[in-house]
Image: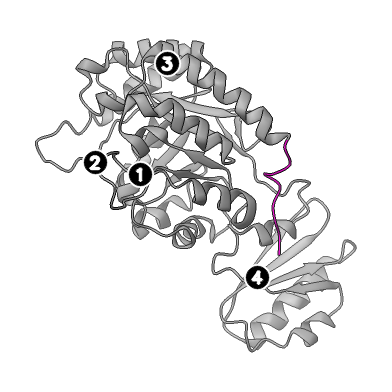
Amino acid sequence: MIIKMKRQATPEQIEEVKQRLYELGPYEIGDIVGTERVVIGVKGDVTALPEDQIRELSGVEEVILISKKYKRASLEYRTQLNHGSLYSRVDVGGVTIGGDELVVIAGPCVVESQEQILTTAKYVKDAGAQLLRGGAFKPRTSPYSFDGLKEEGLRYLQVARKEIGLPVVTEIMSERQIDLFEKYEVDCYQVGSRNGRNQELLNALRSVSKPVLLKREMGTPVEEYLLYAERLMVDGKENVILCERGITTFETFTRNTLDLNAVAAMKRMLTHLPVLVDPSHSTGMRELVPLASFAGVAAGADGLLIETHPDPRYAKCDGPQALLKEELHLTIQKCREIYALVRTSGFVSPALH
């Protein structure tokens, strides 16, 4: 439930409403100060809550039931905050995701050396990408596969960040790594698909000030996925970014199946959070990454997460899906054209019910 206070509501009136809610039942209550008013959020079973009584309290303008199980992540919730925009914009090291410009996060699957990540960062920036990705810690199915340089990889990313000037996005595997990420000034903490349901990690990341990029777990329905985003946001964290990276279906030709329906639904009907598409993990094939990128942007995505490598033949991880330098540049150029067309079409505007 959302209780929208009047613009002129006093702090005393706001406190009176909250006290009354505490009296009525065991609810989690929090308020968000918007640009024009305060909105009070109520979590719990509100079916027995006497709406008429609350509506009559001084300073209350409107009482609204949120139909979605996820509250703060929902588009319905955002409409009540009067922030000036229905869609959230998330700042990642000075780059705005969810704004007027397509954002591209590009880099290798895994950091292999200082030379490799510096070389990649330079041409990634030249190609038009605004953020650098690269794994220092890598989840791998086989215990014999290369699983990253770990702290050394974070150090290499920090050097690339300072020398090339691109903010860094990298995957965090455990809550125990938060201190390391802070030490090496990581700009955005990525939660990968394998950890998409890791409640302990998500709970720990609530208190992190840096943005969190949450990938969709490969077998998670969209609304369940948004509940995991809600877990990050439940204490008031707002800088959360979503990423569709393909789901598991009966299809085996591609690595996964890019769920464009989910991208369109999230942007138009379900959430105010920025939505990215990962065409690399969706397809697993370099030949298909550009086309999947075009499709993702056309479906309404705010940005892309693309893998690239100076020489994919020698990549220690996911070489077959990594774009070459020239392919990355052309893909970004064409995606910007599609993004401009989609954003002026009017079809990305939310369809509220």
Earlier in the chain: of badge 3 and badge 4, it is 4
Circle number at residue 139: 2
Residue at 23% from the left image edge and 30% from the top image edge: 148
Q: What residue would you read off at disc 3?
A: 327
Give coordinates of residue 332: x percent, y percent: 52, 21
Q: Are marks 2 and 4 in contact (CB under 8 Å)?
A: no
Q: 131 or 60, which is in the foreground?
A: 131
Q: Are marks 3 and 4 in contact (CB under 8 Å)?
A: no
**Disc nearest the viewer among 1 and 3:** 3
Amino acid at circle 3 = Glu
Earlier in the chain: of badge 1 and badge 3, it is 1
Q: Residues within 10 Å of mark 4 (few under 14, many from 20)?
A: some
Residue at 32% from the left image edge and 18% from the top image edge: 309
Mark yes or no: residue 185 visible. no
**Disc nearest the viewer among 3 and 4:** 3
Q: Is residue 58 left or right of residue 168?
A: right
